[in-house]
Amino acid sequence: MNLDIGVLWIEDSFSKEEEDSLRRRILDAGFVARIETIPNSAGIKELAQNHELYHCFDIILLDYKLQDEDGDEIAPTVRRLFPSTTILFYSGSLEENELRQKMAAKEIEGVYCSARRRFIERAGSLIDQTARSLNRLSGMRGLAMRVVAECDEIMKQAILSMSARSQKCAEKKTDLDNDVIEFIEQSRERYTAAIDGNIENRFATFAVDSTKLFKHFRRLTQIAANSAEVFGLDEDQTDRLRELRRSSADYDREVLKRRNILGHVFETQDTSGWTLRGSDEIKVGDFPDIRRGFARHIEILREMSELVTFLDGKLP
């Protein structure tokens, strides 16, 4: 399961306002928009080849009036190259019934139509349908694991860079050692205490895991925020780093804790649909909000990493 929705937007009079609206609408569904725009069918075969390999696009937005060609003329090619991808055909001059007639005349099936004044909302509704089909526990578990793995890698690379650049950061490795040793000792104590109990007590006892990695990342980014000159940050970048640190403070709760819960709950069917059992902290209806939280934290950690490793790109 992916955290993003791929959009191929075939449009010759691209509007930043419409793009922003579409991105917000996709975010409302719990996904991040990944949008590629082209003014006509030029280069579409290469995009289709990539799509066949990597499933780049979940929806195609096709305008009627394009650069040097009409959307209904290229629609057969678009459908042939993307046989299972949702297509939304829209126009600022034609109504839905006229657009449908053009698709029927070309004998193209499975194409949705919309007047331009409401095609963002129409696209959002189609994306909502995709999101509902993905709201299954197995997909969310996989997504949570993938998100944490990506965030771990972002933080590891940033920690390596900060430790190499700043002696203060390098010295903080002893704090990481203390975290790990304390965890090992507490785990030993918990398990030793469970020996006098039954098997259930042993199951409940549950190295540098994701929690400790995040804790260390916060230590070093605090140093970076207070030693801006060492990391090549100007005043605005330093303020931004501090702002991002505040925004990332709930990473443990919004990402790591939710990943752990998703790993232990299970699905059952009831009269209202799929229901989660094993915890009352997460419901199926929470999945879009969980995905939004995942997406927000990945973007935050990426930007923080870019700031604290800014000088890495300046090396000769």
Image (cartoon, grey):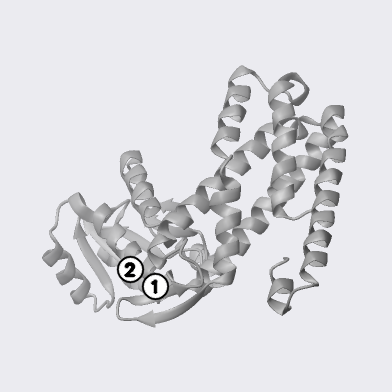
Q: Amino acid at mark 2?
A: Gln
Q: Quadrant of residue 160?
A: top right
Report which residue position mark 2 lands on.
129
In the visual, does 63 lie left or right of 290? left
Against 207, is 266 above or below?
Answer: below
Q: Position of residue 276 (x, y in %)?
A: 45, 72
Whether residue 207 is visible to the viewer of this picture, yes or no, is no
In the visual, does 89 lie left or right of 270? left
Give the Cα separation between the discs numbered 1 and 2.
6 Å
Residue contact at pointers 1 and 2, CB within 8 angstroms:
yes
* Residue nearest the observer in this picture, 9 or 208: 208
Against 122, is 1 above or below?
Answer: below
Q: Position of residue 188 (x, y in %)?
A: 83, 61
Q: Quadrant of residue 15?
A: top left
- The residue at the point 28 percent across, 66 percent down is 73
Q: Amino acid at mark 1?
A: Ser
Q: How packed is label 2: few (under 14 Cα within 10 Å), some, or many (20 or more)?
A: few
In the visual, does 66 lie left or right of 293? left
Against 184, is 227 above or below?
Answer: above
- The residue at the point 79 percent across, 72 percent down is 196
Q: Which type of secondary structure does the marked residue at label 1 adopt?
A: helix
Q: Quadrant of residue 217?
A: top right
Q: How packed is label 1: few (under 14 Cα within 10 Å), some, or many (20 or more)?
A: few
Q: Position of residue 267 (x, y in %)?
A: 47, 77
Report which residue position mark 1 lands on.
133
Whether residue 23 is visible to the viewer of this picture, yes or no, is yes
Q: Position of residue 18 (x, y in %)?
A: 31, 44
- The residue at the point 39 percent across, 71 percent down is 85
